[in-house]
Amino acid sequence: MATARPHPLPEGQRSVTPHLVVRGAARAIEFYKEALGAEELMRLPAPGGALMHAELRFGDSKVFLVDEFPEPREEGVGSPQQIGATTVTVHLFVDDVDAAIERAAAAGAKIMLPPTDMFWGDRYGRILDPFGHSWSLATHLKDLTPEEILKNAAGAFEG
């Protein structure tokens, strides 16, 4: 008798999940819990103590974490410190962006953009975490149509 093939999307997962490579994943987990309110779901240590996989929950979404390894296991994969840059910003909606950015800064993040009311209807700010990853945080303030956002954007970029 053939067994049923499991659903391609595991229970509790989303179609897209950020997977961050960090230098010091165990420290990063503690930072994300303290600074951004993450909940640790699991961690899988590799021989030698590094983490080969960890899962965190931020609200209704997950982020995967892995420690960098001395030599990237895949071409072009490394922590921001290992490669000297980051090209991705992880976006996180929070109840109070001002308090969230203040908490993140107190935990060691660098504020890149203080919380500001934006033309698209969110109060928005950006931080750089101590592990080199960029995060944008936002609290949604009002629902706008695409037309209203375009009109607001034109006004914002006029001067």
Image (cartoon, rainbow, N blue to C red):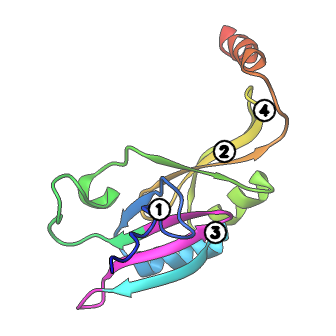
Viewer-nearest of labels 1 and 3? 1
| Mark 3 and mark 2: Cα distance apart in space | 14 Å
- Residue 35: numbered disc: 3
Q: Which residues are magenta?
A: 46-64
Question: Height in image: 65 above or below 26?
Answer: above
Image position of 11 (left or right of 1): right
- The residue labelled by disc 1 is 9
Q: Can you give x and y, in whole percent of width and height, for residue 150 in the image?
A: 70, 15
Viewer-nearest of labels 2 and 4? 4
Q: Is residue 49 magenta?
A: yes
Taking depth in this image into account, of 148 and 13 the one nearest to the observer is 13
- The residue labelled by disc 2 is 125
Taking depth in this image into account, of 32 and 11 the one nearest to the observer is 11
Q: Can the viewer see residue 112?
A: yes
Label 2 element class: strand
Label 3 element class: helix
Taking depth in this image into account, of 67 and 19 the one nearest to the observer is 19
- The residue labelled by disc 4 is 121
